Image (tube, rainbow, N blue to C red):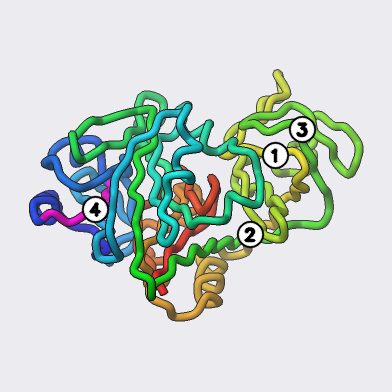
Amino acid sequence: MNTLVSLSDAALLIASGRALALAGSTRALAALPAGNWIGGTSYYFIGPDGGTKSDELVFVTDLSAFGAVTFARYGADEVAKITSEAPEHGFSFVLTPAGSASLRAFAQRPYTDDLFLRPLLGWVAGVDLADLRGGQAQVVDGRTRAIDSDALVVAHVTLPPEKLASISIINPFEKSDAHTLEFDAAGFSATECLVDGRRRRLAEFLVEAGHAHGRLPLVGDFSGAALNVSIQAVELVSGRVDFYAPVFPGVKYHLAQPLADYEASFAAAIAARGPAPVAFSCNCILNYLYGNMESRRTGEILGPVTFGEIGYQLLNQTLVILDIV
C-alpha cells in the first residue's frame, strides 16, 4: 500500500501490526494509536485524484511489504549512526522536521563517496503554508506516539536476498552554462562566492542574473549527478542568501534554466525512467506550488509533498522514487 487513506483506515493498518511510514497533519498523526510506524507532518499530497491539501487524510507506505523493519530515533548528534546501523542489504527511510538542528546536521554531513554505499531516502516534514511563520514541523515515533520537532525517526528495512533497493532522482531542471558558482564553506546561507572565478556578493549577482525570485534552484554537479539547491531568501541589505539545502565547497553550481512548461517537463522526466512500479515517492512543495500541481498528477506516481526530499542526501525541487527490484 502506498496511497492516501482515511484516519480510520490508517488506524486499522496500525492495529494489524504492519510497519508503516505515515504522512499527515499534526492533528491526524496525533490521533493515531501507538504501533509500528514513523510519521512526519505534511498537509499536501499527490493522491489518486491529483495534488490535494488535507488535514484529515494520511499517506501510508507499507514498509513491511518489502522486508523486516526495525525503527530508531536519532538526535542531531547521532546522525552518523543512521548509516552505521543501516542494514547491509536493504534501505533506510528517514524523516526529520524542517528547520531543525537534526535536519542541518544530517544535510551537512561531509560529501564523501561512502554516502552512497547504502540506500537512504526519506523526506522533510513541513507545515501548512497558511501557517508558515507560526507552524511547527514535527516527526512522530509511533512506538510511543512521541512527537518531536528536532529528531530523525528512521525505519531500517532489510530486504530478502533476491530484492534490491534502487533510488531514482527525477530532476526536471537543467543547468545553464552561463556562469559557474563555487562556495568556500558548507552551509545553508552564503554572502559571497566565486562567480566564474571572481569573488562576488551573491545577492547582487542573483538580482543581476534575474534569479532572485526563488523559483529556480542552483544545480550542483555532484560527481556527474545534477542535484538542486533551492533559494529560500535573498537579502540585499545584509547581502545574505539563504538556501533550503546546504551548498558545499568543491562543488560547481550553475543557475537552473527556466522551464517553459513545468508539468510537461516533469512528465517527460518521469516517462524517461520507464514503466517500473514505484514502491514510494515524494515531491517537493516548491514543485507543487510553482508547477500548479493542485488536482494534477505526476504520471502514476503518488506520495507526500514535502519540505525537502532525501535521496542519500537532502535535495530540493526534485521527485525522489524508491524502486524494489
Which amino acid, mark 2? Answer: Phe
Tell me the number on the disc at residue 143.
none
Query: Which of the 4 image quarters holds residue 210?
Result: top right
Q: Which residue corresponds to mark 2?
A: 173
Query: Which of the 4 image quarters holds residue 161?
Result: bottom left
Q: Which residue corresponds to mark 1?
A: 248
Which amino acid, mark 4? Answer: Leu
The residue nearer to you, when weighing 92 against 237, is: 92
For discs 2 and 1, the disc positioned in front in the rendered view = 1
Q: Earlier in the sequence, mark 2 or mark 1?
A: 2
Residue 115 falls left or right of residue 279 = right
Find out whether residue 310 is within the magenta segment: no
In this rendering, the answer to whether 209 lies above or below 79 is below
User: Measured from the top left, where is residue 256 in percent x and y?
Assistant: 69, 53
Query: Which of the 4 image quarters holds residue 1?
Result: bottom left
Q: Which residue corresponds to mark 4?
A: 20
Q: Identify the residue shown where x is 27% and y is 59%.
A: 68
Give the residues in magenta: 17-23
Which amino acid, mark 3? Answer: Leu
Residue 231 falls left or right of residue 309 = right
Q: Earlier in the sequence, mark 3 or mark 2?
A: 2
Q: Which residue corresponds to mark 3?
A: 202
User: Measured from the top left, where is residue 15 in percent x and y?
Assistant: 8, 51
